[in-house]
Amino acid sequence: MTKVAGEWGRVRQRLQAEVGEAEYRAWLRQMALGTVDGDEVTLHLPTRFLRDWVRSHYGERLNALWRSENPAIRRVDIRVGRSFAAADSESTLAEPAAGSPGAAACAANPQARPGSARLMESMDGRDAFGVMLEPRFTFERFVVGKPNEFAYACARRVAERPASFGFNPLFLYGGVGLGKTHLMHAIAWELAEQPSERWASVAYMSAERFMYRFIAAIRSQSTIEFKEQLRSVGVLMVDDLQFLIGKDNTQEEFFHTFNALVDAGKQIVVSADKSPSDLSGLEARLRTRLGCGMVADLHATTYELRLSILGAKAAAATAAVPSKVLEFLAQRITSNVRELEGALNRLIAHANLFGREITLETTQEVLHDILRAHDRRITIEEIQRKVAEHWNLRLTDMISSRRARAVARPRQVAMYLAKQLTSRSLPEIGRRFGNRDHTTVMHAVARVGELMERDAAFGEEVENLRRMLES
Ligand code: ADP
Ligand code: MG
């Protein structure tokens, strides 16, 4: 072992010198020597995230460095696991996070008592109270983009180092279907792989369930057991906290549980549809405490994020969905990820069921009701207004019979956008443009599409209009 340990020490040093101190601290510091088996060395990292990262970014280099120390080693394997270097002694090196605003109102965050009870041996997909966690809701399957990268980073950080100062509680907020529940489950899944048993016991529940359990406990006179059970977990997650508005007794109970857990150094993760300060129906002292750790919001999705989510989901379903269709959906279904996902699932199910290829036409057919519901967001009139404004025309020019190029071209663009952004049929669009024939609209759509391809500046102009209308 000493020979291997010596090799490991040198490999480590060389890697550290190569990548620099900051990078080393961020990704490699927690790496520890596992086992040596013949020509294979195993290194351990505490989480799946770190393992994946180190594998993909440093795997090759580790192999090469080790081989140069000892040519008999053919492979360096990187796994999740505990090693000789205790994770706890390492974590004292962890740099504390910056204090959060309003920290004065927040209690200190002492370390947890060691040896707190753990409810389960392995999580097997359920939380400490038997709630099933959704297998799809993992970090790996969460697509990161500008609107959610901060919330994602905070969730990852909490899963890596629970209850660190500045991140407790973690408060995630945002509109419906933007990924709050997904991130919470992802934290739970990740913690299940943590080598430290202290955090493996997770309780996840909606605020509604929290209330029903609390009421049931009162009825069966087992509130003490309920509280004990709650306080025995390492991490408590309560989803959709806005549900507690107006439920004063449950709020009170939650507040006490919350305080007890934070004081015991446990991690709390809470989600809601609004920021703590905007949850005006909640008691002021609860709101204050909720805002004491890290508050992270999930913003409405952008076209780019929707497109990458669709791409990832289509790939996961191993379905052949043309990129034109994905672009169309990302453009048209803008409300939230849940609807986007629902639309794609329906499309794939339909294609499988009838053995039909997915095309733009089948998409419009299969999803016509969803698409129609989304139309309400952009009207033909809005399009006409925006286009007229852009080219300094009057709104009436959109429906007039003037054929001068300066009027006719913008009108064609408006028809093109009406076809792209609404699900009105060609005859309907024609009627709205001064009772024109549907062949006129068809011609306009084709002509504008053609021009956009030929003239990049014009294409950019039309795209900008589309983006403005969609935002
Ligand atoms: P919320 O709890 O905020 O209402 P959910 O977490 O339930 O939303 O997300 C709704 C659906 O959208 C889920 O199926 C989830 O997996 C999916 N989803 C949301 N955001 C993302 C994302 N960034 N990447 C992949 N899937 C996402
Ligand atoms: Mg949710």
Image: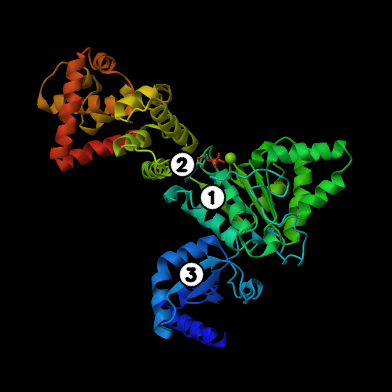
Q: Single out the residue that lies furthest toward the right.
A: 221
Residue that appears at 47% across and 32% down: 342
SS at mark 1 in the image: loop
| Quadrant of the drawing holding the N terminus | bottom right
SS at mark 3 in the image: strand
Label 1 close to label 3 by CB (< 8 Å)? no
Q: Position of residue 105 (x, y in %)?
A: 69, 58
Q: Position of residue 224 (x, y in %)?
A: 86, 48
**Closer to the camera: disc 1 or disc 3?**
3
Question: Residue beneath label 1, please?
Answer: 138
CA separation in Å, label 2 and label 1: 20 Å
Q: Which mark is residue 300?
A: 2
| Quadrant of the drawing holding the C terminus | top left
**Figure colour scheme:** rainbow
Mark found first going from the N terminus, 2 or 1: 1
Question: Residue beneath label 3, please?
Answer: 77
Q: Position of residue 32 (x, y in %)?
A: 55, 75
* Residue type for callout 2: Ala
